[in-house]
Image (spheres, coloured by chain):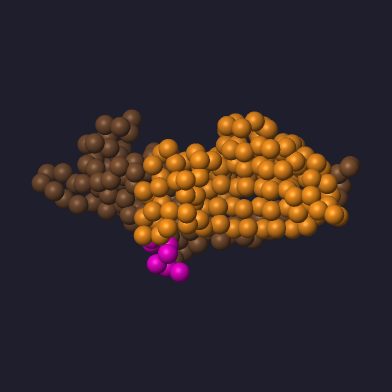
Chain colours: A brown, B orange
Amino acid sequence: MQVVTDHVFKALADPTRRALFERLARDGEQTVHALTHRAGVSQPAVSKHLGVLKHARLVRGRRKGRETHYSAQPQALAPMIDWMSIYGAFWRERFDRLESLLKRMDQ
Amino acid sequence: MMKPDTTRSLVIEREMPHSPEKIWRALTQSALIEEWLMKNDFQPVVSHRFNFRATPVQNWNGIIDCEVLVFEPNSRLSYSWSSMGLMSVVAWTLTPTKDGTHVRMEHSGFRSEEDAAYKGARYGWQKFIGSLDRVVGGLD
């Protein structure tokens, strides 16, 4: 699980990859051509980014004729949803700090 | 399919022996926010976009993108909280009590499309989050 989470985190840390993933999640299956047209980077760069997303299992490629059609696999985000639970500990600690600050503040 | 109003959220509530006005300052003045939460360029204006900046760690740049959604002095404060491709909303509610203030914080992972305050809606996230909810629902 830890390894999978790392891949997902690395894949989404890059803004171009995040944009590609969001576009596929939003608009559905697309070819590298269509993605390149709107990504503002070269086709080899898009293919490389898609490779990273594929490795993290965030997208899936499907050969159709001479082109590969990519689609988002949002279930790969599940490890990050577990990561959300970390916010429980985060906010409790921040509440403690808030209360300590309030004690130091003037009325 | 999950109900459209399904929200995954974290709620923390505490009674604090301080006035709502004082707690409000700690929640909304940039220098004070930094003391207990994180470095920030928060401004008390609805639609103001700002960042929280934590120390970067491996696989995370430490930056949280936010936008002020609700600002009702001494009572309600809400901002979007987006990081690592996930969008969420943090909402604070202050209620005066006999001895101070009831502080409620709700950090919601995903809001329904009916919630007009959720600005992410216009990016078509519902469809995406719908799939995610199904998956996560299946994990529980």
Overall secondary structure of the magenta stretch? helix
| B91 vs B38, nearest the viewer | B91
Q: Residue at x 86, y 55 (%)?
A: B99
Q: Residue furthest right?
A: A106
What residue occupies the far left of the structure in this picture? Answer: A65
Depth check: give the residue in front, A55 or A78: A78
Determine the residue positioned at 56% across, 47% down: B89
Q: Is residue B46 left or right of residue A44?
A: right
Verify whether residue A83 appears in magenta.
no
Total labels: the figure holds 0
For residue B103, above or below residue B78: below
Q: Residue A50 at x, y = what percent?
A: 31, 46
Residue B64 percent across, percent down from the top left: 57, 43
Residue B61 appearing in the image: no
Task: Left or right? Give the position of B19 relative to B8.
Answer: right
The residue that appears at 28% across and 45% down in the rendered structure is: A28
- Please say if B34 is above or below B1: above
The quarter of the rendered structure image containing the N terminus of chain B is: bottom left
Does B139 lie within the magenta span? yes
Taking A99 as reference, is A16 above or below it?
A: above
Q: Residue at x 76, y 54 (%)?
A: B102
Q: Quadrant of the C terminus of chain B?
A: bottom left
* Image location (x, y in percent) of residue A36: 27, 35
Q: Residue furthest bottom?
A: B140
**Residue B43 visible in the shown view:** yes
- Residue A71 placed where, x, y %? 27, 49
The magenta-colored residue range is B134-140
